[in-house]
Amino acid sequence: VINKIDLAPHVGASLEVMERDALKMRGERPFVFTNLKTQQGLEDVIGFVVERGMLEAGVNSVI
């Protein structure tokens, strides 16, 4: 999670550079840009936790 993206322009940070670096370091693994104050990207974070954290009941789930 790369949060507080709204502050990037105020501190001289480049979201493009952050994205390039994240892709380089993480490869195929996911990452998301967020501004959780405005909830931008929140649905992506929740979806990841539900899906990858196996919180969503599925065909193969054990209850």
Image (tube, rainbow, N blue to C red):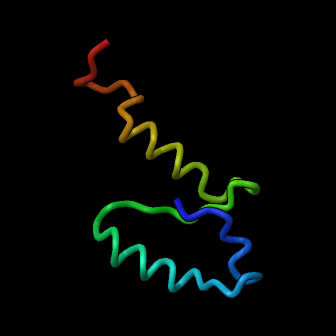
On screen, residue 11 versus residue 50, left or right, reads right
Residue found 60% across the figure and 57% down from its top: 41
Considering every residue shown, the one lying at the far front of the view is 11
Q: How many marks?
A: 0
The quadrant holding residue 55 is top left
**Residue 7 pos. (x, y %):** 73, 73
Tell me if residue 56 comes above or below residue 38 in the rendering.
above
**Residue 52 pos. (x, y %):** 36, 41
Considering every residue shown, the one lying at the far left of the view is 60
The quadrant holding residue 4 is bottom right
The quadrant holding residue 25 is bottom left
On screen, residue 53 versus residue 43, left or right, reads left
Tell me if residue 56 comes above or below residue 16 in the rendering.
above
**Residue 63 pos. (x, y %):** 32, 12
Residue found 68% across the figure and 61% down from its top: 35
On screen, residue 6 versus residue 61, left or right, reads right
Tell me if residue 4 comes above or below residue 59 in the rendering.
below
On screen, residue 34 versus residue 32, left or right, reads right
Tell me if residue 4 comes above or below residue 53 in the rendering.
below
Residue in front for this viewpoint, 2 or 52:
2
Residue found 72% across the figure and 82% down from its top: 11
**Residue 53 pos. (x, y %):** 38, 36
